[in-house]
Amino acid sequence: MIPANFDYESPRNLSEALTLLQSREDAKILAGGHSLLPAMKLRLAQPTLLVDIGRIKDLSYIRESGDRVAIGAMTTHADIAGSQLLRKSSPLLALAASQIGDTQVRNRGTVGGSLAQAHPSADYPAA
């Protein structure tokens, strides 16, 4: 099936993204797209605006801060699986990320999307 018509924006920073999201009540964030795009094709979701946050580099990171590790929402499963920092500090998390989906899913899917969707096939909270 073909999705309903929608507008597409790709902001360069978080401020632009937030402004766009506030501009329409039914605006949706597009990150990896593994859940939203199939729902749109089936017309289970019909946003009039997609805000692609893929260009916002400030949302993709893995960094140590004292005794904690912070992971940005746009960090891919592949980045988590391959992170030496996470392999050392949180090996179960890195292992879980390496088992999510296939290579294409790991390269495009994000931790933020997985947490927001809470799909059993990409369940980080359990790790």
Image (cartoon, rainbow, N blue to C red):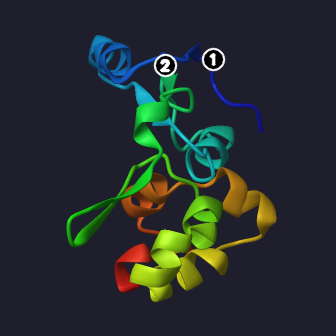
Residue 65 position in % (x across, y down):
25, 60
Left of 82 or right of it: where is 87?
A: left
Residue 92 position in % (x across, y down):
47, 88
Nearest to the observer: residue 28 or residue 95: 95
Crowd rating for badge 2 (residues with CA inside 10 Å; few <14, some 14–19, many 20+): some
Can residue 56 be seen here?
yes
Contact between labelled residues 2 and 1, with CB atoms less than 8 Å apart: yes
Residue 64 position in % (x across, y down):
33, 62
* Residue under pointer 2: 48
Q: Image quadrant of residue 99?
A: bottom right
First along the sequence among labels 1 and 2? 1
**Residue drawn at the location 54% of the way across and 66% of the way down:** 80
* Residue under pointer 1: 5
Q: Amino acid at mark 1?
A: Asn
In the picture shown, does residue 38 fall above or below 105? above
Can residue 120 be seen here?
no
Nearest to the observer: residue 28 or residue 71: 71
Q: Which mark is residue 105?
A: none
Nearest to the observer: residue 24 or residue 10: 10
In the picture shown, does residue 83 fall above or below 117? below
